[in-house]
Amino acid sequence: MSAKIPVILDTDIGGDIDDAWALALILKSPELDLKMVLTDTGNPLFRGAVAAKYLEAAGRTDVPIGLGVYENDGTGPQEPWLGDYQLSDYAGQVHEDGVGALIEMVMASPEPITFFCISAVPNLRVALEQEPRLAQKVRIVGMFGSLRMGYDGRDEIDAETNVKLDPDGCRQMLSTFPDITLTPLDTCGIVHLTRPKYDRIHDCQDSLIKHLIESYYSWAEHASWTQVNPRMVTSTLFDTVAVYLAISETFLEIEELGIRVTAAGYTLIDENEKRIRCATRWKDLAAFEDWLVERLTKDCS
């Protein structure tokens, strides 16, 4: 097997549950070497605690947690699942200056680090201010934008949340980093697992996957913006596609497109803009679903 790919997960975990699925997928992928989970947007202590509880369940307290840019003291629909668990309970290392830890790790690495962006990007904005050379040592694989399709497969594009929350930061990322691959809503926005495929994950007895499903039930009860039946189907698993793109592109069509980010958070195809690698269509969505199930259930009893 070839050398593992060093990766950092930049995440707003604790909001939409797909971040937790992405974290689980990284931990279950032997090709990837998770160097750090870096919280982004909102309340870094809350998001860090959510990440920590999953890492504990996976037996991966070797993975450090970096606290990203502080924005507020808010929480989210995974707060009830946290219960009494606090970030201070985490047995692993916690970097209070997560952006500083990111810069130090990337600049010291002998090889480029893959940076999973599955959140808005205030951390990257601050990191570039402190160390502009960072852009030459990072490969961005992100979940951003809406090019020809919107949420839930709509024919009209939407202002995708990660872009809408920080259009300027997204614009800076696209213009600054030379190596970027994105999954927009066109591909990631139509990923769900239904029965019987979902049953294999739902019934899995692996510690991490059990915690993932338990948290999904709690999240489904408390997420105000959507309604799902956690016994029958997953929510939309946007961020898992970004993880897949770091490993393989077999099931996806990749186009190089110029992308213009508007002030309202829309990502418009514009031939006059810098060309970005974008996964715009599925070649075989069913095969990706099978791959995802196999990965997540490989340690199930």
Image (cartoon, rainbow, N blue to C red):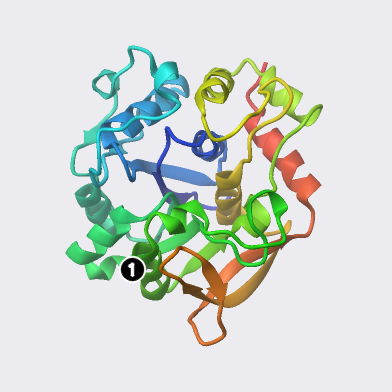
Q: Residue at x 69, y 45 (%)?
A: 191
Q: Position of residue 239 (x, y in %)?
A: 55, 46
Q: Position of residue 18 (x, y in %)?
A: 54, 38
Per the image, label 1 sits on a secondary structure element best described as helix
Q: Residues within 10 Å of mark 1 (few under 14, many from 20)?
A: some
Q: Where 141 sits versus 44, above or below?
A: below
Front residue (pair 213, 171): 171
Q: Position of residue 170 (x, y in %)?
A: 40, 64
Front residue (pair 74, 253): 74
Quadrant for the C terminus in the image: top right
Q: Where 276 sits versus 162, above or below?
A: below
* Residue occupying the far top of the picture: 84
Q: Which residue is mark 1?
A: 135
Quarter of image, res 42: top left
27 horizontally vs 187: left or right: left
Q: Residue at x 31, y 29 (%)?
A: 46
